[in-house]
Amino acid sequence: MINVGVVGATGYTGIELLRLLSKHEAVELSVITSNSEKGKLAQDVFPNLRAHVDLEFKSHECEQLKSCDFVFFATPHATAMHYVPNLLEQGCKIIDLSADFRIFDAALWEQWYQAKHTCPNLLNKAVYGLPELNRHKIKTARLIANPGCYATAVTLALLPVVKEGLINISDIIADAKSGVSGAGRKAALATQFSEVSESFKAYSASGHRHLPEIIQSLNSVQIEQKVDLTFVPHLVPMHRGIFATVYVKSIINTEELQKCYTDYYSQENFVDVMRSGSHPDTASVRSTNMCRIAIHPSKNRTQPTVILSVIDNLVKGAAGQAIQNMNIMLGLDESIGLTTPEMIS
Amino acid sequence: MINVGVVGATGYTGIELLRLLSKHEAVELSVITSNSEKGKLAQDVFPNLRAHVDLEFKSHECEQLKSCDFVFFATPHATAMHYVPNLLEQGCKIIDLSADFRIFDAALWEQWYQAKHTCPNLLNKAVYGLPELNRHKIKTARLIANPGCYATAVTLALLPVVKEGLINISDIIADAKSGVSGAGRKAALATQFSEVSESFKAYSASGHRHLPEIIQSLNSVQIEQKVDLTFVPHLVPMHRGIFATVYVKSIINTEELQKCYTDYYSQENFVDVMRSGSHPDTASVRSTNMCRIAIHPSKNRTQPTVILSVIDNLVKGAAGQAIQNMNIMLGLDESIGLTTPEMIS
Amino acid sequence: MINVGVVGATGYTGIELLRLLSKHEAVELSVITSNSEKGKLAQDVFPNLRAHVDLEFKSHECEQLKSCDFVFFATPHATAMHYVPNLLEQGCKIIDLSADFRIFDAALWEQWYQAKHTCPNLLNKAVYGLPELNRHKIKTARLIANPGCYATAVTLALLPVVKEGLINISDIIADAKSGVSGAGRKAALATQFSEVSESFKAYSASGHRHLPEIIQSLNSVQIEQKVDLTFVPHLVPMHRGIFATVYVKSIINTEELQKCYTDYYSQENFVDVMRSGSHPDTASVRSTNMCRIAIHPSKNRTQPTVILSVIDNLVKGAAGQAIQNMNIMLGLDESIGLTTPEMIS
Amino acid sequence: MINVGVVGATGYTGIELLRLLSKHEAVELSVITSNSEKGKLAQDVFPNLRAHVDLEFKSHECEQLKSCDFVFFATPHATAMHYVPNLLEQGCKIIDLSADFRIFDAALWEQWYQAKHTCPNLLNKAVYGLPELNRHKIKTARLIANPGCYATAVTLALLPVVKEGLINISDIIADAKSGVSGAGRKAALATQFSEVSESFKAYSASGHRHLPEIIQSLNSVQIEQKVDLTFVPHLVPMHRGIFATVYVKSIINTEELQKCYTDYYSQENFVDVMRSGSHPDTASVRSTNMCRIAIHPSKNRTQPTVILSVIDNLVKGAAGQAIQNMNIMLGLDESIGLTTPEMIS
């Protein structure tokens, strides 16, 4: 059994990691940490874990992490970078679900995250953990930067056509919508039930942290031209789910476009290219690691093609993708621990 | 007092008309109809109307409608057109909240609404009731085609810059989101609570009926070039509200753009141009006739400018705008009956 | 015009006071305070107040409060008591929407609110502001303790039969359910959207602060015996509304019971006794000052009668009732400023 | 492998059966039926079943059902009774999730369900499938009447103390609250999103169909006296979950009461008796087969004890309990296929 630790196990992605790892047949969940709940039993904080996780929360500094084969970080930004160098030295493999190692240009990271990066030397050792983009590198990685939730939905919607150069790569719009869990599990006025329910809004319309991450990934597969895009996130009064509506100017027709996607993702377990003209909803991926994509033809030569992409932000956008990465690193079937069919609701 | 009738008073827009008209100081609500609830008292069907509306639902065919000064139609599409010619002959003024008179090209209407238009001769007599576009014509109109909810939010977001030719008018994307009340008040599986809550989806991504209406309005103010745009509607798990995120390629800078909007709407009671970079939410217009607009600058020369526009689909997108039109036709202050501050929630 | 001040105007009840007072024909809103937002314009914090409230938030200590005819406190518990004595001396009339003056026994108050009461001498000068119970005293009061939201719904459901001694007054159960706004507008993990939506729970099942308030009111009308009851509150995933399901053992039959209620409330503007067997919902009172009550007969002689009672916790349960009290104190029609029909949603 | 058929697989309980059975290690899902969707692939109707269920919907009359070892009925009431006699003759075992075989007195059933029972002779052959009550009989049953959702939550909250005679068994109140999925998956105005969200209401306050079922079960364990209770159901704006607040007059103290429950359920996999004074919420059992119960002491000798009980109405209240029954009938570990930890949301 693989010994696994989860640092920051009381946020929504941390809890989701516990839910999924506790049933993973190759994994022994050994250490879980939470600076706010340390000393308490997981099942006392989260009754749903009774009979599934029989561990006490430790502090992030606890020694036991060092003996883990894998350590997952589900901490706020600018936290993991303080622990990762030491754990790597101890031989642990790291999957960081926060943003600390996602942007390989330290200056760019510091600009977007408004913090000093404490181990920039690790940035070029980290592998960006989007299996559909970097599976080969992930296999041998020791430090995974698990992608952001928006970045996963948008990048998967664009990878095939950007790589093949089949769209105008500087004229892309990603209008994305997220459930409230994306804001994290913490006391905040803006995400109180009474502030969020029965309302819809855009936020960070002039620039969101997942934008440089998306551009970095798309540029990595398109060497001839520079990719540019506009990305506007919105908040939906629901808990889980990301919906990305992506507008591109295609240079090929819809049939060719559809084929480009089905070919590109034909071997993928967790990308489901639906029939052209389909309307996926976030409920159809709730609690699963699946990304569903559907292409809608442009209505005429000058208008954009519409690509719809849905994921569960806490699974394919966080904990599920992290486990998919671990499975790849272990040489296991990628779908172990990730095959439950979603609940309709 | 002006005698007013409401045909189809048991849908969400009809109920909203009753709510607003029952408090309108210049109006006497005389007749309300509902083929499904005829013979019942309004207050027995809707307890919230107790002490406010003391009327019985009649059938749509009832004779009393003929003696009304104004008749509002809040019926499904392809219904009003069967009653309007006769009522116009009787001297009634008509405000139709359905789509029957919105598209002035009968063939185009029939294509989008999949029905035979029974009085195409009235189409060029109808005035499209968007006050910010057609106030002058509304004053003397006898038949108003009250705009669609999406069309109101999107058109108001684009009118100033399309009219002045300050954007590329064939490269516009309107990514719009609506609360569930937009689907109407009727038994339908797709809008059951359990199907809609905790989910988000696009629909009619390949073409929605409000698109030709938007294009018709924008073309009416821009005679040199043909406007074209892509419009994708989405369903939000909330009752009220429309949020439009509109992407345009501007040929002027943000300051000029902002000035274009504040100038255009400076005399309007019901369009609030917020500071550039603001993030309006639908809650801030809930239950009011206000449209709030905010402009976000493009991040660089090649990327689009983002225009955010919010309304309450049942008020500025339906019943409130209908009353605004009536006020204009009566020569009254436009805001009579429409000034209650919105509830935060 | 009556000069009015609102202390603590950024909570849900404070905002509701602003919404209602800004349209009240006899009132001039002169001062609003908020220690957290002081120095900001109300309309910058709450865009929905643009064009309705043109005031800046002051601190609670501001001098202008002293020149108000009425000062409303919408502050957390144990705040108003520090300001009220001085303002009373200045000649202001006070309507306190918090709990500071609701329990006339200082020791009992201190036990439930876990704080030292700083002006116990005012407790017997305060009038408990439930008009249906204390209208006569309210007329001449200078300090009103505005009732709690649960207490309003439950007390109105029980007043007629307790007063007349028509039930077993020591065998009463009030199972009450509240929307989330009852918890106040503040950053808290327990009321985050993601914690509350799609869940239902009881809280304070072993004792809630509104219990002594309910018992005090019921005992005040029933001098022969001591009233006792069990009260369990629950949290509903919605913003507004209280629903109380009250179980009593009646000694008379349903027709007599129904008559007892219709008689008792026959002159009341804001209590609507529905037909026996009706099912009111909270939506039917949303945004209004109405309490709707319906009686369901016991299924046999030994089983209880069920009394259903609904209010909007922010209106009849707080701001609306406060304005009703002010109207009474001013000798005005009680319903001024409180007559808008509710929105269906 | 056990061959299994599901009749009526497009309702919420039917879909939930598919979700759970498709992962059950001892089961081969062979036939699924739906009269409304027959001829379609399950994965085309429910995209979440892609890669999990590769079957086409048949009609309820299809011959293949006869070769199933187990047939589950997830049909509306008064449907299963037309198919069950024939399938029993063919040797199938039946688990009926509808109400057709729950009430053993045919006349009583006909009174509550307003239909003629077509096979009353089977009523005394059916076993009421609440394992915590009837495990022994379930083992050898051939026809299981799977309990109603409310009945499960309320009966489990009362079984230990009713059986032991530790409460006044004719003075019980069950105030129960259900998510909207309890109303079934069908087009209905009353359960439209816009009708249900942001509202709370009681329904069937004068008598609900689950009441005779609860009384029948409780009477079966308490032979000395007749049990009677009052049961009022309510509708909560959420999809899943039942919360029962049960009020009883106990003749023993809280410690003894707590012990009575922990003893009674000590060997149960799916009943979790929490510490006295705990507040379970429905989220803590979402998507699982668990019932959580907590006892709150009465505040004094004359007031009732409060027992809180929560389940997921679609799992322990329907599909999960049905699978638990199948496991018992097959002599398997009861928890096979039912062990996934719940999602927090």
Image (cartoon, coloured by chain):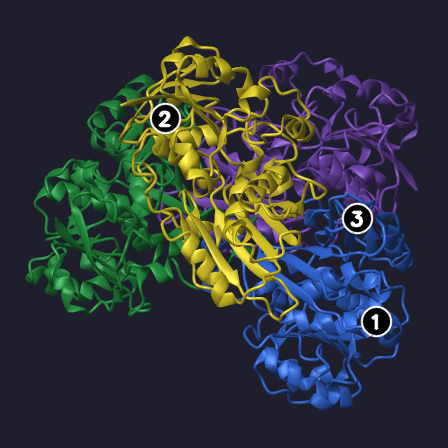
Chain colours: A yellow, B blue, C purple, D green
How packed is label 1: few (under 14 Cα within 10 Å), some, or many (20 or more)? some
User: Who is closer to the viewer here, D239 or C63?
Assistant: D239
Left/right placement of residue B107 relative to residue D289 reads right
- Which residue in the structure is indicated by mark 2? D295
Q: Give the quadrant of residue B57.
A: bottom right
Q: CA distance from mark 3 to mark 2?
A: 45 Å
Label 3, on which residue? Answer: C337
Q: Amino acid at mark 1?
A: Val
Q: Which element carries disc 3, helix, strand or loop?
A: loop
Nearest to the observer: residue B278 or residue A124: A124
Q: Secondary structure at mark 1?
A: helix
Q: Residue at x 88, y 20 (%)?
A: C89
Residue at the front extreme, as displayed: A224
CA distance for labels 1 and 2: 69 Å
Could you tell me which residue is drawn at 73 percent across and 41 percent down?
A: C16
- Image quadrant assignment for residue A223: top right
Question: Circle 1 is placed at which residue position?
Answer: B221
Where residue C81 sits: x, y (%)? 75, 19
Q: CA distance from mark 1 to mark 3?
A: 43 Å
Residue A327 picture location, percent across and down: 34, 33
Q: Is residue D237 above or below residue A124?
A: below
* Outermost residue to the top: A63
The residue under label 3 is which amino acid type? Gly
From the viewer's perspective, tell me whether residue B204 is left or right of residue C336: left
Nearer to us: label 1 or label 2: 1
Q: Quadrant of the N terminus of chain C?
A: top right
Do marks 1 and 3 share a subunit? no
Q: Quadrant of residue C168?
A: top left
